[in-house]
Image (cartoon, rainbow, N blue to C red):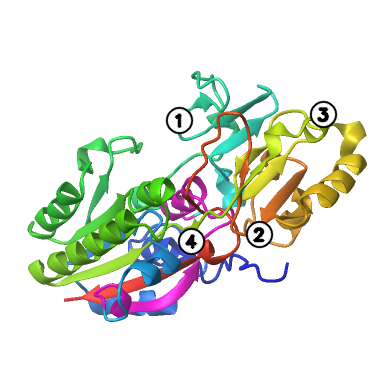
């Protein structure tokens, strides 16, 4: 898989959570990051983890100067999970589990017992948009690592309103950048030790809509960096751990899988998973024909792999039993295009989920 960036489960976003879980006295079986583990020994009054959706190394480099506040405080480059997408990476960040354990691999997942592709964050059918029945029982139980903490730190979360939490009494709902940073500052000013797990959904949606190199993305990323600097300067005795779930790339073309009648005739259902990591459930009698046809028609942009081969090669982690959710094949995009999986798939201007530059995320550490 020449030119691809394979997830490194000793040097990825999962290992941030492993180090934080260990620091909070929560169970941990994963490798930790030595540089983060050392920073956590500083005995800071406040420890703040901040995840900015989509703020990978590539968008950061394209939209701020080298001496920018966030850029100059990058301590290490990490990989995302694969597929490099929010459903997958943020679930690993929250649960301290690899994708093969939690099963939240991508935006749209195929559930054979329902014979449906389901947008799992929304709980809706990927085609009709209607709410579906129980599908979460086939996924891993979401158990956030900080909910099992044994520590003298007060646990706090800062999330948009749509993020599910087990302890709403310690959650803070923030729907704007001003609310997000203001809330974190207020928590840091409380008496006693405070741990904050926070997630902000930008610049991901802005880059999807306008592209990574758009003026809108540049403005948002610069505002995030400026707000981080202001927060750092207005707090004391605080360790900030800042990263992203994935990056993004500018989309340079579209591949209409759903509109290929010959391809669709070989499939049980529309392609699913993600636009740059496309999963296929193939009719049993069509497996050999599918592989030959796909490689002939699409190999210029996509590299086809059997899902089980990717599992064996460790692309989804070293342990877990959710491989049946990955379909028969996964086609990984090797250009800057995206697949259009069904008639309702959006034609985004920026995207991620592949194994190219969107896989790299920064580890930013700040101690005041």
Q: How far apart are labels 3 and 2 at the CA level? A: 29 Å
Q: Nearer the viewer, mark 4 or mark 1?
A: 1
Q: Nearer the viewer, mark 2 or mark 1?
A: 1
Q: Which residue is mark 4?
A: 14
Quadrant showing the C terminus: bottom left
Looking at the image, can residue 104 be seen? yes
Give the mark nearest the N terminus, 2 or 4: 4
Is the residue under label 2 in contact with that under label 3 (CB below 8 Å)?
A: no
* Image coordinates for residue 153, horizontal then vertical, percent: 22, 59
The residues colored magenta run 68-96
Give the mark nearest the N terminus, 4 or 1: 4
Q: Residue at x 33, y 72 (%)?
A: 364
Q: Residue at x 51, y 71 (%)?
A: 11
Residue 94: say if magenta. yes
* Image coordinates for residue 169, horizontal then vertical, percent: 21, 38
* Image coordinates for residue 21, horizontal then vertical, percent: 39, 60
Q: Which residue is mark 2?
A: 315
Quarter holding residue 25: bottom left
Q: Residues within 10 Å of mark 4 (few under 14, many from 20)?
A: many
Q: Nearer the viewer, mark 3 or mark 1?
A: 3
Q: Nearer the viewer, residue 318 or 344?
A: 344
Q: Nearer the viewer, mark 3 or mark 2?
A: 3
Give the mark nearest the N terminus, 3 or 2: 3
Q: How far apart are labels 2 and 4 at the CA level? A: 13 Å
**Disc 3, SS:** loop
Q: Which residue is mark 1?
A: 122
* Image coordinates for residue 254, horizontal then vertical, percent: 61, 46
Q: Residue at x 57, y 29 (%)?
A: 118
Q: Is residue 144 above or below residue 317?
A: above
Q: Is residue 269 above or below residue 20?
A: above
């Amino acid at each position: 898989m020449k030119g691809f960036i394979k997830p490194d489960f000793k040097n990825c976003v999962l290992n941030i959570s492993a180090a934080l879980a260990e620091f909070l006295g929560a169970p941990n079986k994963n490798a930790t990051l030595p540089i983060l583990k050392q920073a956590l020994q500083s005995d800071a009054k406040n420890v703040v983890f901040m995840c900015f959706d989509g703020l990978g190394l590539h968008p950061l480099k394209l939209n701020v100067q080298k001496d920018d506040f966030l850029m100059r405080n990058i301590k290490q480059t990490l990989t995302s999970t694969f597929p490099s997408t929010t459903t997958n990476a943020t679930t690993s960040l929250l649960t301290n589990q690899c994708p093969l354990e939690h099963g939240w691999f991508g935006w749209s997942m195929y559930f054979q017992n329902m014979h449906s592709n389901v947008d799992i964050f929304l709980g809706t059918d990927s085609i009709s948009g209607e709410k579906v029945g129980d599908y979460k029982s086939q996924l891993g139980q979401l158990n956030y690592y900080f909910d099992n903490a044994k520590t003298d730190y007060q646990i706090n979360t800062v999330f948009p309103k749509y993020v599910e939490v087990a302890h709403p009494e310690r959650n803070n709902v923030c729907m704007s950048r001003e609310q997000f940073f203001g809330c974190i500052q207020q928590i840091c000013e409380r008496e006693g030790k405070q741990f904050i797990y926070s997630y902000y959904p930008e610049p991901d949606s802005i880059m999807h809509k306008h592209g990574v190199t758009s003026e809108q993305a540049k403005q948002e990323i610069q505002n995030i960096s400026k707000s981080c600097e202001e927060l750092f300067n207005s707090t004391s005795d605080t360790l900030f751990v800042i990263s992203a779930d994935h990056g993004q790339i500018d989309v340079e073309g579209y591949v209409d899988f759903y509109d290929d009648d010959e391809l669709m005739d070989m499939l049980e259902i529309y392609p699913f998973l993600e636009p740059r990591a496309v999963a296929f459930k193939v009719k049993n009698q069509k497996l050999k024909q599918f592989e030959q046809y796909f490689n002939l028609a699409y190999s210029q942009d996509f590299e086809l792999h059997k899902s089980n081969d990717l599992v064996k090669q460790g692309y989804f982690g070293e342990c877990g039993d959710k491989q049946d959710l990955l379909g028969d094949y996964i086609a990984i995009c090797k250009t800057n295009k995206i697949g259009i999986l069904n008639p309702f798939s959006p034609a985004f201007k920026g995207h991620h989920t592949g194994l190219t530059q969107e896989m790299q995320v920064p580890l930013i550490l700040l101690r005041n």
